[in-house]
Image (cartoon, grey):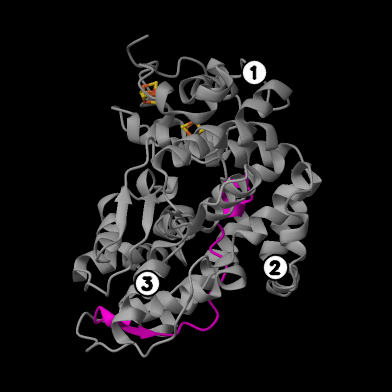
Amino acid sequence: MSGSLPTAKPCAIPDTPLAHAMPGLDTCVHCGFCLQACPTYLALNDENDSPRGRIVLMRALVEGDLSLDDPAVQTHIDRCLGCRGCESACPSGVPYGQLLEATRATLTARRPLPAVVRLALGVFARPWALGTALAMGRLARGTGVASLLAGVKGRLGFAFAMLQSTALPIKRKNYTARGDGSRGSVAVLQGCVMEGLFAGTNRATARVLTVNDYRVVAAPGEGCCGALHAHAGDLETARTLARRNIAAFEKSGAELVAVNASGCGAMMKEYGHLLHDDPAWRERAERLASRVRDVSELLAAAGPRPGAALPLHVTYDAPCHLVHAQHISAPPLAVLRAIPELQLTPLVDADQCCGSAGIYNLVEPETSNAVLAPKLAHVAETGAALVATGNPGCLMQIGAGLARAGSTTRVVHPIDLLDASYARRDA
Ligand code: SF4
Ligand code: SF4
């Protein structure tokens, strides 16, 4: 198929987010280059579960050929991981992530989200509820309950295996991070899941930035970035959370904002788009978004400083929201290469989604498993003892998959490896 398909019919769903996204829809020339980059197409072998197929469905909604109530449309849109692998493969610059978000927001206005999704999003939007849930998770991890139940069949066992995989697989040594602060001030997003289950990685992030001459400052009041809500179509809650973060980081006075969870970094870099129609916040959102960096970007810009030897066999998996949404591929490898004697084995299809995608593995478990399977096989081929990846969802999904497959390979954030290397140098 070739040639653009301009809108011929009047819009059947005016004043909806999808109707406003029409210019993006028009950029698709239906070439199909994105198909082989799409994990759901590869797993399900159905054109309707491909980027091109979903774009055709979106257009049919706008032109009135399909109804927003059509269950088949909802199924194929729900099955999209939002990994944006199709964006990287697309020669036409189709803003697929924005189209998906607009479609989900349009569908969500028409039908209630599934109860489990509403429950999860409600918890993430309320710091007290999320704090309680994560404290229970830490308790299950610390008491060994998570490890005990990780082998239970079904999604419950998988959820406990995810929880168990948040335990750091290497020994953490504390050290006093020193640097001259000459690279400017930076506030670190502590976030929600990262602070709840990977608090040690957040502390490590502050230390490695300090060692690399950034001056780390606090930003009280920051929290969940709103990515889960935006991806599920709940744009209003996402905007509320974004405004809270913008105000907190402005108040911190930091020149830059460092993020160690690539899904959150991708979201925060798009705050300008999210608040585009809010005249009171648009400029503030754009300003904040322009100051957001993945932590690996900041470290790569500084070298990063090498640490002491860490003779570990590691492979690297690229989180979708780092490589496809933020177009960052070299900096995390630079972080790992700053560690002497670390053996880095490339991972086949490292930039393919692992099937985590926020709460996708909760609501679409079969497809999530089908997408995860080739990832686990490729990890096994490397023979690595550790998979390094910079996103909590990917860490938990790959970690749980490996554990339940009986593998001894564990998962770790690249920052924790660099931090361990610096700790050894300091010892
Ligand atoms: S999204 Fe891009 S790659 Fe896919 S069919 Fe459309 S133009 Fe081609
Ligand atoms: S976002 Fe990922 S799953 Fe969705 S259409 Fe694009 S490549 Fe496929």
Q: Give the range drawn in magenta.
A: 210-234
230 is within the stretch colored magenta:
yes
Quadrant assignment for the C terminus:
bottom left
Q: Which of marks 2 and 1 is nearer the N terminus?
A: 1
Residue in the foreground of this view, choosing between 63 and 154: 154
Q: Does the residue labelled 3 lie within 8 Å of ligand 2?
A: no
Instruction: Please tell me in which quadrant of the rendered image residue 175 appears.
Output: bottom left
Q: Earlier in the sequence, mark 3 or mark 2?
A: 2
Mark 3 → mark 2, Cα distance in angstroms: 30 Å
Question: Mark 1 = which residue?
Answer: 66
221 is within the stretch colored magenta:
yes
Badge nearest the viewer, 1 or 3: 3
Residue type at tag 1: Leu
Question: Mark 2 = which residue?
Answer: 141
Instruction: Please tell me in which quadrant of the rendered image residue 68 appears.
Output: top right
Mark 1 → mark 3, Cα distance in angstroms: 43 Å
Does any portion of residue 328 appear in the rendered image?
no
Task: From this view, report whether residue 289 is shown above or below residue 117.
Answer: below
Question: Mark 3 = which residue?
Answer: 257
Quadrant assignment for the N terminus:
top left
Residue type at tag 3: Val
Regarding mark 3 in the picture, which secondary structure is present there?
strand
Crowd around label 2: few <14 · some 14–19 · many ≥20 (10 Å): many
Badge nearest the viewer, 3 or 2: 2
Q: Residue at x 68, y 54 (%)?
A: 161
Task: From this view, report whether residue 123 is shown above or below residue 314.
Answer: below
Q: In this view, does 182 lie to the left or right of 366?
A: left
Residue type at tag 2: Arg
